[in-house]
Image (cartoon, rainbow, N blue to C red):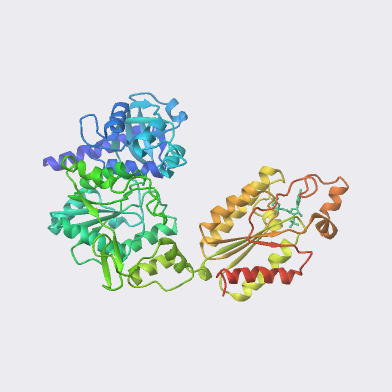
Amino acid sequence: MNDYSENLLVHFRRVESLKDEAVNYVSVDLNKRQLCDLELILNRAYYPLKGYMGREEYESVLDQMRLTDGTVFPMPVSLDVGEKVSAAIKVNDKIALRDEEGFLLAVLTVSDIFKPDKKREAFHIFGTDDPETHPGVKQFLHSVKDLYLGGLIEGIHYPIHYDFKDIRFTPSETHRKFSQNGWRNIIGFHVEGPLHCREKEMSLLAAREAGGAIFMQPTVGLKHPGDLDHYTAVRCHQAFAKKYPKNMILMGIIPLRKRSAGPREALWQAVVRRNYGCTHFMVAEDHADPFDTDPSGKRFYPLGAAQALVQQYQNETGIRMVPLKRMVYSEERAQYISETDGAEGMTIKEMSREELKRRLEYDLDIPEWFSWPEVINELKHAHPPRYRQGFTIFMTGLSGAGKSTLAKILLVKFLEMRHRPVTLLDGDIVRRNLSSELTFSREHRDLNIKRIGFVASEITKNGGIAICAPIAPYEESRRYNREMISKCGGYIEVYLSTSISVCEQRDRKGIYAKAKAGKMKGVTGVDDPYVPPANPEIIIDTSEVTPEEAAQEVLLYLEEQGYIR
Ligand code: PPS
């Protein structure tokens, strides 16, 4: 047996014994953010880290952007845990690190358990500890737990992915690919959102200046494989990468989570790309700025600060900074030109993200100078025009306000149109099926409404129409639904403002009579509150219009907004 086979056997035996021993260890189920870090430690993208930083290493990184041995490493990487976990362990213990399903990925030997000063960390990493001025700080303070663990990790299995396996390269795989391609200069291209013609020209210019090929690495950090967006984004990147000359580009995705920490993050991304085998790294003048897509031009970090920092450390890190220069489309020249030289006096064409989104939503023309049909077609899957998006009609109002009648008419109208599958989630029907165990307490009403919202969001996400008709007396749960469903498609809140006196007169179910007779307690509008919605899309008082007229009003709104045609 040669050395290689012998090493492999030793490793295999070690993994097997770790698996057996881990049954007795305290387990930590890592969240998506933590899984990203673990994968990049295990595959050596975070080289020279062999585990999570202990206190001394952590402090050194915060203060000096260096590990204790002096190596440049600007971002702290420790494992954050809650009090429950930290109370169950002590230094030198071993911990089983598992994924969200409990699958064993690695064993951590704890060297440090410490409480970081999170505000101080934020200040060092982001340049501020104010969550109101920096969304990255807000996210960090909100999502990272209060205690950190440090220590060496022994890997058992990479976090499992079923999607895009063929383009999830490890650093050793990219090193091999680069040398197979005969590439000596490789320019790392960090990518977040979808890219179009302009970004191709900008990256090609940078690659020409550095005299090398491009390694394009879109981040897929915290996207969940269940999100439609994740697939669309990667497919857009794949279509984009096909637009480069042959043997000029390699694309691989990386589970690197975004922090929006500006210059420090740019330097850190450069170090990671160096570990993947890149010799150069493209840095934009507003690289990793939390407001880099803000149409007003607002930025948190000074322009060029990220480029300067990566350049300052390039001899030590071993990866050179290549500026990603802004380009604009000149109508006269019918090509992209550098914004700083030659753009003066030219007719410049640009399209903002918002305008692109609007054109996608209304199925409008997107010019060839902006993007390619292959990329746009992929985007259209994620942002179909409104008439192909799913939507939810969420009615709210007192019992007897006319919700069920209006819902039934709309159901028939939508079925007649045969555009999309339609589901009616009437208050009574939901109470009988989905929420049969719930009472009419505030807590249970909120739970009921959120359940309806969840079902409606699934229907909407899959392109259907959900008609919901509960009382939904509280703003908080209605707002919760609005936020959740709007991410999946259209959300139209219809407030049936019919007064309590009219509802009492109608009293089809006799609940108001029972309330008056003292036989029923907690009836909405009588002795239980109804909070009218703050900003409904449509308000209808059914004492003033017929049910058909009310339905017509909703249909007109949908037509006006582009949901039906
Ligand atoms: S909620 O508040 O949104 O969870 O209510 P919802 O699920 O829509 O259920 C309302 C229907 O249940 C009947 N019902 C009551 N309504 C109000 N208050 C109390 N205490 C109550 N108890 C039973 C009532 O008939 C409602 O039917 P609709 O369709 O609204 O007339």
522 relative position to 32: left or right: right
In the image as oriented, which residue stretches furthest toward the front?
345
What residue is at 14 percent from the left and 42 percent from the top? Answer: 4
Across and down, in percent, residue 229 comes to 42, 58
Quadrant of the drawing holding the N terminus: top left
Q: Report the label total.
A: 0
Position of residue 565 relative to residue 310, above or below, is below
Q: Quadrant of residue 212?
A: bottom left
In the image as oriented, which residue stretches furthest toward the right?
517
Q: Quadrant of residue 510?
A: bottom right
Q: Quadrant of residue 427?
A: bottom right
Residue 371 in sight from this viewpoint: no
What residue is at 57 percent from the left and 68 percent from the top? Answer: 561
Of residue 85 and residue 25, the one placed in the foreground of this image is: 85
Quadrant of the drawing holding the C terminus: bottom right
Across and down, in percent, residue 544 comes to 78, 66
477 relative position to 168: left or right: right
What residue is at 78 percent from the left and 50 percent from the top? Answer: 525
498 relative position to 357: left or right: right
Residue 255 in sight from this viewpoint: yes
Position of residue 492 relative to residue 158, above or below, is below
Across and down, in percent, residue 27 comes to 41, 34
409 relative position to 347: left or right: right
Of residue 262 and residue 82, the one placed in the foreground of this image is: 262
Across and down, in percent, residue 75 comes to 30, 38
